[in-house]
Image: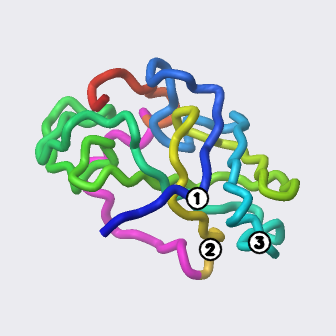
Amino acid sequence: MVYKPIGIIHSPFLGVENMPIQPVGAVGIRGEVELFTEYAPGLQDLEGFSHIILLYHFHRAAQPRLIVMPFLDSVPHGVFATRAPARPNPIGLSVVRLLGRDRNLLQIENVDVLDGTPLLDIKPYAPDFDHYEVQSTGWLASARDKAKDQRSDDRFR
């Protein structure tokens, strides 16, 4: 299996220090998605969506770990019960607000991604398909409010 980046995500975060760890902590922070020119035709009709899902490669993640200490807790958890970047397949996901499009450039908001991150895919966010009422959020239930203020560090890089 080989994936090829389709673009680059640009953000104000040149390093992991003080970078938000989730979009909820990045409210109002703007960035840009630069899609490589050959993929620009695939953006047709995307501007009709207010939010998009970005799938990207954690290009500066540390070696994979199966047990991690997440930013939002002081107890170790299995990596698949977290959103830590030090994963066997270092793929990240963020839902961001789409502000506009100019040819192959997307203006976005609520970006929590490191500048220069390789983009793997874009999907429209569709609440009818992507939003669920959940009954349980595991260990995150007690850490939910921390996500707005918690910032990244070198723990997983």
Residue at 58% in and 61% down: 53
Residue found 20% across the figure and 29% down from its top: 74
The amino acid type found where label 2 is placed reads Pro
Q: Residue 6: which disc?
A: 1
Residue 31 got which mark? none
**Residue at far right of view:** 102
Instruction: Indicate left or right for 23 with 29 as reference.
Output: left
Q: Secondary structure at mark 1?
A: loop
**Label 1 amino acid?**
Ile
Task: Indicate the position of residue 140 as horizontal and vertical percent values.
Answer: 32, 48
Q: CA distance from mark 3 to mark 1?
A: 12 Å
For disc 3, the neighbor class at 10 Å (few under 14, some 14 to 19, many from 20) is few
Range covered by the magenta-colored residues: 129-146
Three-letter code for the amino acid on which mark 3 is drawn? Pro
* Marks 3 and 2, how far apart at CA: 24 Å
The mark nearer the N terminus, 3 or 2, is 3
Tell me the SS state at disc 3: helix
Q: Residue furthest bottom?
A: 128
Label 2 secondary element: helix
- What residue is disc 2 on? 127
Residue 83, given in percent of the width and then of the height, sits at: 33, 48
The residue pinned by badge 3 equals 41
Q: Is residue 55 above or below residue 66?
A: below
Which corner quadrant of the image does residue 128 belong to?
A: bottom right
